[in-house]
Amino acid sequence: MEAVGEALLSSFVQLLVSKLKYPSDLLKYALQEQVHRELKKWEETLSEMLQLLNVAEDKQINDPSVKAWLERLRDLAYDMEDILDEFGYEALRRKVMAEADGEASTSKVRKLIPTCCTTFTPVRAMRNVKMGSKIMEITRRLEDISAQKAGLGLKCLDKVEIITQSSWERWPVTTCEVYVPWVKGRDADKQIIIEMLLKDEPAATNVSVVSIVAMGGMGKTTLAKLVYDDTAEPIANRFALKAWVSVSIDFDKVGVTKKLLNSLPSQSSNSEDFHEIQRQLKEALRGKDF
């Protein structure tokens, strides 16, 4: 799966979660057919997966096992949509028939509806649309994919979890390396950002910041890496210095500033004093485009 595929996957999973979460005829039908608990499992597990896609996007660039995990999740999401479409169709058909039954129970309309379609039990409905076994199979696959995430280092931190130094160190660290042949369809976005970076600004203005904002898993980090790794003459000639720093979920301004300083040529600091590190970094950047 190309990295750009994560944008589609993230949006697709979000759509599935919405279908499973918010009240609808589909969910009413699921309740009637006694499969609502299975669909609730889908919604809860997919919601958790959605929070992992941003981490998985970074890891899959250098980890084939994570890439394969994302492909399995994508295939499962497509199969889920097929099941939900079947459910939605059956729910709509039931609704139309109920309205016809109420409005013209003795009319010719009623007589046109086959008897086999007017008498339902949960077992008969599940057999007619062949969904019972499909739902159980989807649930099994979803549980398998969810169980694999821990072994791949994909972890969703709980909102109340206290992040210790050791957990911070285990948080996935991004790299400026990206395997370009895997990335498709980002050339235009990359060029837009490069043009923004090369744009002349008055010296008196504040430093500009280009923010790449999107849902998790849509390729923000990958796009930033493509720009950072660009070795074309305009970029190479314009900027004397550049540095890549991965920022943890547990933001540490001293650690980030020190990493920036130490990543510059001929610069090194062991100081833990924030103001001293800032002073050294300011001196190293003075008069340079970066």
Image: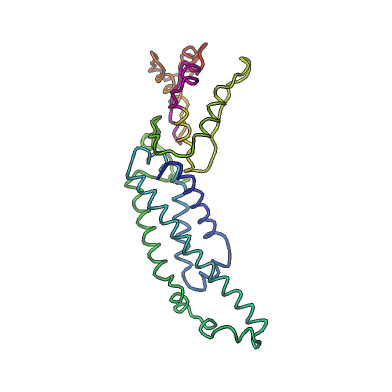
Kindly indicate the quadrant of the structure image that contains residue 247: top left
Q: Viewer-proximal residue, 50 or 70?
A: 70
Q: Viewer-proximal residue, 95 or 284?
A: 95
- Residue found at x 45% / y 39%: 184
Magenta stretch, main secondary structure, is loop
In percent of width and height, residue 254 lies at: 45, 24
Q: Which residues are magenta?
A: 228-249
Residue found at the very far right of the displayed protein: 103
In percent of width and height, residue 205 lies at: 63, 18
Query: In this picture, is 256 found above or below 265?
Result: below
Q: Viewer-proximal residue, 260 or 119?
A: 119
In percent of width and height, residue 231 lies at: 43, 23
**In the rendered structure, does residue 190 fall within the stretch colored magenta?**
no
Query: In this picture, is 197 found above or below 15?
Result: above
- Residue found at x 43% / y 30%: 246
- Residue found at x 37% / y 41%: 60
**In the rendered structure, does residue 248 fall within the stretch colored magenta?**
yes
Q: Which colour style is shown?
A: rainbow
In percent of width and height, residue 139 lies at: 40, 62
The quarter of the picture where the N terminus appears is: top left
Kindly indicate the quadrant of the structure image that contains residue 94: bottom right
Give the number of marks.
0
